[in-house]
Image (spheres, rainbow, N blue to C red):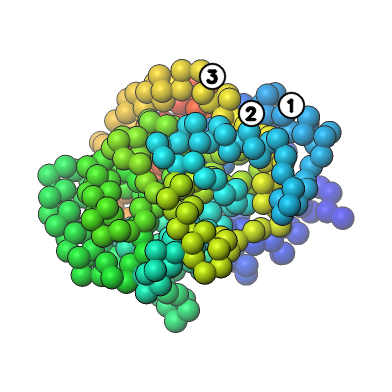
């Protein structure tokens, strides 16, 4: 069995797929041996301040005593039972908590095992709801260009048709309706709204719902857009009887500065997906919340039930740690803390504007983005950040950070320095 750092890395290189990475010519990986607070420890003993929150999930940092305790306590009771015909306190309490926190009207909860699965479930819900209303011909989704909703087939079909994976899988993906990406600033909203409304008018008869990442498109390009666009979507959905789905997997739990991105617009969707930060980065878990009306529509469809039920649905360990994570989040002044992080990002990234290769610097809540005029050399950028003691993983033309919420001002300044430095070398 691989034991030394060299053996582990060699076997990894020969046998393990990493995300979006070649099997025959993989980019190098770093071996993590520990993680605590905002710091990752590597096999050579060095430490990196984590600017990524492990893909936006570890909002309270690593090895958190409260989360560890919740997990250990539940493991001592029982780790898992099937959710068909059985239930348990962690799932019930988590549902209660999510309903309390969610925008008004979202009160029916489906616990899924990953963000992508929750999006698949949301798409099924929209279609089954329309069937329940006697509109089985409504099977397509209306969405916006530049989106990202996950990697499974249903999810891929609503990701950006150019930047996503459509071309490779075109023959097997359902064809949805794509509106232009919403504008970055308010002056573009009227023109965008007109185009969005026109598409809805044209296709409403075949469309079951609208699905978008509210306020901030994440993996599709870190693109924030005005809250007003969400109000336009709500109005369009109401006018045409469409199910409005907000994918808050990246934006939820305070990341954009409000508890939900939807809150910035004062809009409640009909379906909301949450994931990523739900368990504070401990275990994979997601949830789909919907209204009583959609719940009733689905139940009125010919099957009478929602056609989904994963093996690990409602996993008690994940629910217990999620509950502790949400208690941690809401027990403190999370909004004040998010505002503090935003100020730190604004201040720390301002200098990147002096770099002639930088076309845009933008922040929203605890998201800081530096956009270059060329695709990033990911390895060079990550190495430059690591030299300053920071872990970053850029993509496309973007060097960005989504730091843990517990990042203090000094570490935040270090992360910003690393983003700025990476933008110079990449
Ligand atoms: C990450 C992400 C997903 C997919 O979640 P997984 O847990 O990786 O399957 C879906 N939607 C959005 C907006 C995401 O950021």
Task: Tell me what residue is drawn at x 51 percent, y 18 percent.
Answer: 332
**Marks 2/3: CA–CA distance:** 10 Å
* Observer-nearest of 23 and 231: 231
Does the CB distance between marks 2 and 1 fall below 8 Å?
A: yes
Question: Residue at label 2?
Answer: 324
Task: Tell me what residue is drawn at x 31 percent, y 40 percent.
Answer: 267
Q: Mark 1 falls on what kind of element?
A: helix
Label 2 neighbour load within 10 Å: few <14, some 14-19, many 20+: many
Question: Any mark on residue 331, and which?
Answer: 3
Percent across and percent down for residue 282 are 65, 39
Task: Tell me what residue is drawn at x 87 percent, y 55 percent.
Answer: 1
Does residue 42 appear in this view?
A: no
Percent across and percent down for residue 328 are 58, 24
Q: Mark 3 falls on what kind of element?
A: helix
Which label's residue is closer to the chain start, 2 or 3? 2
From the viewer's perspective, tell me whether residue 33 is left or right of residue 297: right
Percent across and percent down for residue 396 are 40, 55
Does residue 184 appear in this view?
A: yes
**Marks 2/1: CA–CA distance:** 9 Å
Label 3 neighbour load within 10 Å: few <14, some 14-19, many 20+: few
Q: Mark 2 falls on what kind of element?
A: helix
374 to 207, vertically: above or below = above
Question: Any mark on residue 69, and which?
Answer: 1
Label 1 neighbour load within 10 Å: few <14, some 14-19, many 20+: some
* Observer-nearest of 308 and 169: 308
27 to 157, vertically: above or below = above
Does the CB distance between marks 2 and 3 fall below 8 Å?
A: no
208 to 35, vertically: above or below = below
Percent across and percent down for residue 365 are 37, 32
Which label's residue is closer to the chain start, 1 or 3? 1
Q: Is mark 2 within 8 Å of ligand 1?
A: no
């Amino acid at each position: 069995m691989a034991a030394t750092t060299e053996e582990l890395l060699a076997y990894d290189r020969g046998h393990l797929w990493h995300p979006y990475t070649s099997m025959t010519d993989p980019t190098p990986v770093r071996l993590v041996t520990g993680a605590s607070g905002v710091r990752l420890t590597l096999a050579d003993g060095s430490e990196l301040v984590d600017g990524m929150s492990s893909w936006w999930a570890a909002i309270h940092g690593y090895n958190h005593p409260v989360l560890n305790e919740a997990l250990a306590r539940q493991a001592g009771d029982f780790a898992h039972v099937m959710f068909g015909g059985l239930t348990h306190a962690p799932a019930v309490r988590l549902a209660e908590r999510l309903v309390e926190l969610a925008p008004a009207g979202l009160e029916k909860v489906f616990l899924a095992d990953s963000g992508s699965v929750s999006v698949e479930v949301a798409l099924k819900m929209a279609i089954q709801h329309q069937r329940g209303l006697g509109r089985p011909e409504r099977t397509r989704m209306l969405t916006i260009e530049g989106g990202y909703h996950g990697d499974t087939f249903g999810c891929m079909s609503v990701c950006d048709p150019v930047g996503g994976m459509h071309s490779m899988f075109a023959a097997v993906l359902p064809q949805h309706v794509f509106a232009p990406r919403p504008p970055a600033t308010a002056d573009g909203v009227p023109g965008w709204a007109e185009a969005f409304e026109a598409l809805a008018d044209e296709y409403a008869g075949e469309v079951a719902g609208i699905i978008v990442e509210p306020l901030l498109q994440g993996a599709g390009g870190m693109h924030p857009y005005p809250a007003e666009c969400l109000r336009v979507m709500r109005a369009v959905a109401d006018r045409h009887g469409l199910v409005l789905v907000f994918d808050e997997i990246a934006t939820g739990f305070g990341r954009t500065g409000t508890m939900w991105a939807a809150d910035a617009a004062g809009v409640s969707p009909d379906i909301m997906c949450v994931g990523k930060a739900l368990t504070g980065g401990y275990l994979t878990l997601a949830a789909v919340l919907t209204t009583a009306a959609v719940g009733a529509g689905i139940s009125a469809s010919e099957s009478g039930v929602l056609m989904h039920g994963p093996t690990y649905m409602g996993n008690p360990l994940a629910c217990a740690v999620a509950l502790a994570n949400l208690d941690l989040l809401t027990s403190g002044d999370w909004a004040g803390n998010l505002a503090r992080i935003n100020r730190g990002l604004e201040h720390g990234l301002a200098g990147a504007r002096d770099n002639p290769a930088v076309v845009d610097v933008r922040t929203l809540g605890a998201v800081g983005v530096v956009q270059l005029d060329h695709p990033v050399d990911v390895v060079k950028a990550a190495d430059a950040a690591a030299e300053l003691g920071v872990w970053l993983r850029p993509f496309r033309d973007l060097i960005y950070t989504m730091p843990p919420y517990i990042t203090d001002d000094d570490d935040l300044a270090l992360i910003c320095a690393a983003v700025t430095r990476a933008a110079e070398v990449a």
